[in-house]
Amino acid sequence: MRKKSWGEHHKSLLDYVVERQRFTIINKFIKHNPSILDLGCGYDAKLLNNFKGRIKNGVGIDLSVGTCINKIKLIKGRVDKKINLKSGQFDIVTSLAVIEHVDFPEIMLKESFRLLKKGGILLITTPSRYSKPLLELLAFKLRVISGNEIADHKRYYDTNTLKRLLVNSGFAPNNIKIRYFQLGLNIFAIAKK
């Protein structure tokens, strides 16, 4: 089983570019001084640190984490097990390019639902099943993205499979919006509690 978090090892320039694109996609959802939980925050909690001037507080969880800074708390742990936090305390839960790495995505999504306030939103990105050949080419043949990250993918999703998981986790079907982005290579899901 994996022991290190994203960012604890070398990242390529392309890794950084893709990470920034994910932040851009969720930027418009970070309003009104929210409380944010970032599942799979990476070693240095880049997303929380990127938005720290616009949030009330943030909690990041990952397998290994750096040090906490100001209003950001980092917790070492798995995101696909019961999370030892009080129910209904977050306005936003994010999980960017994480669900494809976890052993128990259903548990991660049920915990996301539990931890959200009523009216809160879950924001997820994940590579689509169409991206698998390209990601493997970029990682293993061209070596321009992290091979360790791609080798750790447990599964790839399509919009129907991801929606079914979200519904089974408690989100109402009419409160879920899912779309492809980056020419169908990635999926962006928004689920409101």
Image (tube, rainbow, N blue to C red):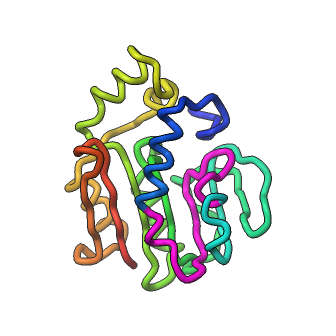
Which residue does the image show at 53% across and 39% down from the upper left? 16
Which residue does the image show at 30% across and 31% down from the upper left? 132
Give the image location of residue 134, x and y in percent.
30, 28
Q: Quadrant of residue 137?
A: top left
| Tag count | 0
Give the image location of residue 95, x and y in percent.
48, 56
Give the image location of residue 99, x and y in percent.
43, 49
Eyeballing the image, is 75 above or below 1?
Answer: below
Work out which quarter of the rendered image holds the C terminus and state it. bottom left
Confirm whether the magenta stretch covers residue 74: no
Give the image location of residue 19, x and y in percent.
49, 46
Eyeballing the image, is 177 above or below 34?
Answer: above
Extreme residue in the top direction? 141
Work out which quarter of the rendered image holds the N terminus and state it. top right
Confirm whether the magenta stretch covers residue 28: yes
Eyeballing the image, is 125 above or below 87?
Answer: above
Q: Nearer the viewer, residue 162 or 22?
A: 22
Extreme residue in the left direction? 160
Relative to 11, is 170 on the left or the right?
left
Which residue does the image show at 47% across and 65% down from the upper left? 27
In the rendered structure, which segment of residues is drawn in magenta?
26-48
Relative to 35, is 19 on the left or the right?
left
